[in-house]
Each structure stands twice: as C-alpha cells, then as structure tokens.
Amino acid sequence: MRQREVKIPEGLYKLIEEHLEELGAKSVEEFVVNAARVALQETTNRKLEIDEKEKEEIKRRLRELGYID
Amino acid sequence: MIAPHGGRLIERIAGKKEKEDLLSLRGEYPEIEISRELAFEVENIAVGLFSPLEGFLGKEDFHSVLKRGRLASDIPWTIPIVLDVDKEKAQEIGEGLFLLYEGKPIAWMEVQEKFTYDKDEMAYSVYGTLSEEHPGVVKVKSMKDILVGGKITLLNHVSSPFPKYKLTPKETRVLFETKGWRRVVGFQTRNVPHLGHEYIQKTALTFVDGLFINPVIGKKKKGDFKDEVIIKAYEALFKYYYLPETATMAILQMEMRYAGPREAIHHAIIRKNYGCTHFIVGRDHAGVGNFYSPYAAQEIFDDYPDLGIIPLFFRSFFYCKKCGGVVNEKVCPHEEEHRISFSGTKIRALLMEGKIPPAELMRPEVAKVITEFNNPFV
C-alpha cells in the first residue's frame, strides 16, 4: 500500500501521544488515520433518495407481502 | 435513514431496453455457468447488498482486502467477492462475459481484468488458518486458478424458495421508514431460535425502534438446520412472541463462509446496506469448530471505527433456575449448578431424537414446528 506524509503541529502530536491510551490507539499515526476515516465516513455518506413513484411501488409490494398494512 | 456503505446504494439491474440490448449480444461473447452461491453473489451486488461493490473484485481491491480488510479506496471490506474461472476459459474471455445460472443468463459482466492469485494467501488472510478442517479453506483450495474482475449488470433475478421473504435493500429501507423505525437492529442467523437468541434480540430491541431478523439462506455445513426449518421456526416465534410493529424478518440468500471475525464485519456491512443502524454480534459469530476465540468477532470491530453501523456485543446467555429466567454472567450471581446453558449440541441432540427441548431452552411452539420435519438438518 502506497503512503503519503502529512505534517501536524508538534504540540498537537505530543498531546495525542500523551493520551494514546484514552484515545484507544497504539500510535499517533493510528489515531490520525482512524480520526480521518471516521470523519470521512460521516461526511461522504449521502442520504438515500428514492423518488415518490418508486416508493409507492415498493410500498404496494410490501403490502402484498404482508409487511405493512 | 442510515446511508449505505460507501455512501451510495448500488443498483446494477438492467431495465427492459438495456436487457434486450445486452441479450442481443449473446453468441458474440463467452458464457460461463456459475454455481448457485455465485449467482447469489451476483444478485447481492446488483441489488446493493454489497454496496459499494459494483462487480467482482479486481486485482488491486482483491489484494487490499486480503492484506488490510479494506478496499483500495480504504472503505472497510473483509471478504473477497470474486469470480474464479479455469485457465482455458480465461483465455476465451475478452471484454465481456455472460454469466449463466441453470442455463439462463443472469448477468452481463464488463471484464476489467484477469489475474492469478495465491490460494494459500487468500485462505489464510480470510480464515486465519490453512487447516483443511476449515470448510472455507477447503473451498478456496478447490477454486479455479484465474480470477476475473469487473462490473456486472443483472439480467434476471435468482429464484428463491421463499419469495415472500426476499427483500432488496431499497425495499427494507422503505419498510423501516414506513414503520417509523429510525434505529433498527439487525440479527444474523443460521439457526433455529432458542430462548437465548430471543433474549438477545429483545434486549437489543429495547434500545432501538425495530428488530430485523435476517436468516442466511444458502449453502451451509452438514449438521446445520435446513433453510425451511429455520424459516418455519421463526414464523412460529413471530406468531406467538413478537409484535409486528417492532419486529420483522427477511432472508439473505448467501453462502455461509464461517470466516469468524472477518465475516462478522461482512455481515454488519450487509445489514448497514439494508438500512440497519445497529448489528448484534454474539459469541463466536460466524465461527466453526474452535478456529476462532469466542469473542474474536467482537474484537475485530476495534479496527473499524469508520464502519458506520453500531455493533451490539453480547456475551453468552443461559437459563438460571434461581433467577428464574434467561440471564448472563454480568447479572446472575448464582453458581454453575443452577445454570442451564443454551448448548446448540444439546438442543440438536434432543431434536434429532424427536424430543421437545425443555421450555427453559426453547419455546414449545418453535420446538413443535422443528420436530414436525422428518430430518431438520442439512
């Protein structure tokens, strides 16, 4: 896997290093990577849009199958 | 409503015109007959259950999944979804390929690449062992030598013995929304329900809006319960012990891999795509024999803080005669002698003899349904 370098302020690095255990990470790098992953997961997730016509068709099938009244 | 894995629900189902156009190409491209299990994978990709996958893995994603449990794009993904072909067939394959199931074309595949792979590396990465006692290892070793990667387009759905319970992620999402469920917990199962399962499900349900029971239908190992037995047993449980306002069931047509921790992540991703916000992970989830430590399938979630679905971890439950109910070691102060464990082996042995397990272990209505089958096991 290819990797890139990112710079962070030294004070922040040290602060993370001091609190690694509470942060649930084994290294500063692991914490930063995981924090980025969580932020991205929340940001890139889009709400699923289903148009009303399709939604009504789905509801009709669900009614036929007995899932909804 | 929770977003699908990777942010977008994949839908690769040909419309009427596209289907006609693609089928008109038959005869110009090679065709391969695929197994029922692979046909399930194709359909699961097409309806979005495997979002963000749009087809079978290419080389970069394949190696990334084995090494890191993530796609090359860094999105969590732990089970390689691959199409294997033999060397002779691989030579025939160019830009496209028809996938047939039971002689009928079920999908068109835009071939992006063909590549060789190391079966030992694949087996060890996914199953954590090379033991041929492990059914997953045996399966990998029996795979053909070339993998073909590329997007698929579904031409025909795979038939199901339980059409009433077959829902797509789009349908479950509309279902949950219509029921007014904002928080939904998914429960994966390949077993008939005993009281321990029911207790876990209801404990989880207490904290969310809805419970989604999702039995896996497909190839299982010898000694597992037959699919129709599982469905009938759950129907009995629903009839007598669940509220339709807060619980529902649909099947998942997919082969069990028994990959323990990695499969637990895979199962969670699928339930996220169905629209679940929470997922139950019990003891030895998707395990087989003694290949995985009892809670390895829970510990692996620490590596995936970005999974986007909340795992609910449960320890073992048992019936305590002194407590007078189903409890676990966190809440029961009594000694071992007062406890009756939900031993699958014990329950199976009783059912095999046509006996009804005690009411502390299994609901009589559920046991009755199971014993009505001559042979409830695979």
Image (cartoon, coloured by chain):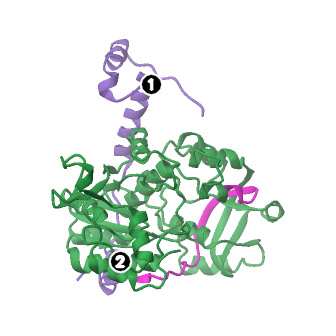
Chain colours: A purple, B green
Q: In this view, does B222 lie to the left or right of B91?
A: left
Q: How crowded is mark 2: few (under 14 residues within 10 Å), some or many (20 or more)?
A: many
Query: From which residue to which does the magenta span run?
Result: B140-168
Q: Specify the quadrant of the image occupied by residue B220.
A: bottom right
Disc sitting over residue B218 in the figure: none
Q: What element carries label 2?
A: helix
Rendered residue at 36%/76% (across/down): A54
The front one of B350 and B142 is B350
Residue B8 in the image: x percent, y percent? 43, 57
Q: Please, what is the three-letter code of the amino acid marked with disc 1?
A: Glu
Q: How far apart are marks 1 and 2 (CA)?
A: 49 Å
How many marks do you count on the picture?
A: 2
The residue at which mark 1 appears reads as A29
Instruction: Please give the chain letter of the residue carrying mark 2.
Output: B
B197, B147: nearer the viewer? B197
Question: Which secondary structure, mark 1?
Answer: helix
